[in-house]
Image (tube, grey):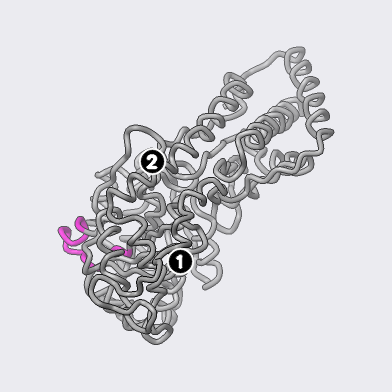
Amino acid sequence: MTTELSADALSGLLERARKDYQDLAGRGLSLNLTRGKPAPEQLDLSADLLSLPAGRHTAADGTDVRNYGGLQGLPEIREIFAEVLQVPVGQLLAAGNSSLELMHDCLVHALLSVLPGAESRWVDQERIAFLCPVPGYDRHFALCERFGIEMIPVPMTAEGPDMAVVERLVAEDPAVKGIWCVPKYSNPDGVCYSDATVARLAAMSTAAPDFRIFWDNAYAAHHLTDEPVEIADLLAACAEAGNPDRAFVFGSTSKITAAGAGVAFFGSSPANVEWLLGNNAKRSIGPDKVNQLRHAMFLRDADGVRAHMERQRALLQPKFEMVARILEAELGGTGLARWTDPKGGYFVTLEVPDGCAKEVVRRAAEAGIVLTPAGATHPYGDDPRDATIRIAPSYPGLTELEQAIEGLAVCVRLVGYEQQAA
């Protein structure tokens, strides 16, 4: 990545970078790019939710949404998201506001009860491991750490996880029980899984009969361009390959409507749905059906979701374009950085020279720009190369975002040239 420089040229660039950093630190900034939260303006797009269901309390099937019951969720909200998430309505479950909560519960239930196709509970087995494509989502890794599940990093490619590595690991090790996947506009590098990758995941031979793909389709409708990316239907591919129980599909409205008051979804085979509903019946008498009804009334249908997400895109796209423009202007041609240009999702991945990410994040924090900790994109917080930084452009306003990315570029130049001069 690094461009060769003469001693004089490097000295001049380092001197300028030090001056720019001194100026940056003197500005008294207080900026935060740590999490991919929707901005207030995005949340305002769903303000009408707060006035719904406007006196109505009966679902389409006659259910009184104020009362107990309906563990699978309202049919009308499941009908809307069946198309979005590529899951048949009868195999889709609508729950509370958090898909992460559903992932947590699926892990707990797999540990404490026997999955369809399993020989025993996971907790009764000596060792449990998950494959973790990297860079990846830190909250997936946190769940594994919470339950003592070993994490095995797998490199990401432009088409998804390196399937040669995945296929070898799942075939030879019966302790490998699952893989984390964010298949569309993945967190954090924006990769979309190719049809070939989906087919191989569905059909591969696994040593564990109860292997599960945790398919976190968090950005199913979160496009940033005029050319929305579509991915292959994993659930259908698994059924066709003779592995109908392999996929757990997750999604939510968290970055569609109200991030803290949305609806989460679980989709899978009939056997897996029955398994989850049976276990959930021990912990709940039903989800928040009032919220599900208001979401169904607000979004109306899958076309309504798409129209709403176009309004979201109008707010997000300029921010991502600004990030790309500043990084190119400040770091293009320096050899100090590479970055992604995602077609959707919520993140940009910045790659700096090996051994520099933690120091860039530290220098940025000292200048008032808080970033996601370096290493968060890898299991156990350990990026072996210390090179990956996740940028979350969604929450700040344009002016704040401009200041933050310009400041980040200053830190990259400072740390990068210091490393070269050392």
At a point 25% along the width and 48% down the height, the residue shown is 232
Q: Is residue 289 above or below residue 377?
A: below
Contact check, label 1 and label 2, Cβ < 8 Å: no
Residue 186: horizontal and vertical position, in percent? 43, 47
Point out the stretch of residues depicted in magenta: 236-248
Tag of residue 97: 1
Q: Is residue 390 above or below residue 272?
A: above
Under tag 2, what secondary structure?
A: helix
Q: Quadrant of residue 204?
A: bottom left
- Say what amino acid the circle numbered 2 marks: Glu
Q: Quadrant of residue 12?
A: top right
At a point 75% along the width and 29% down the height, the residue shown is 418
Front-most of residues 422 and 25: 25
Name the mark nearer the viewer: 1 or 2. Answer: 2
**Is 331 on the left-hand or right-hand side of 309?**
right
Tag of residue 310: 2
Question: Does residue 209 appear anywhere in the picture?
Answer: no
Q: Label 1, label 2: how many angstroms apart (C-alpha)?
A: 22 Å
Residue 380: horizontal and vertical position, in percent? 58, 59
- Say what amino acid the circle numbered 1 marks: Asn
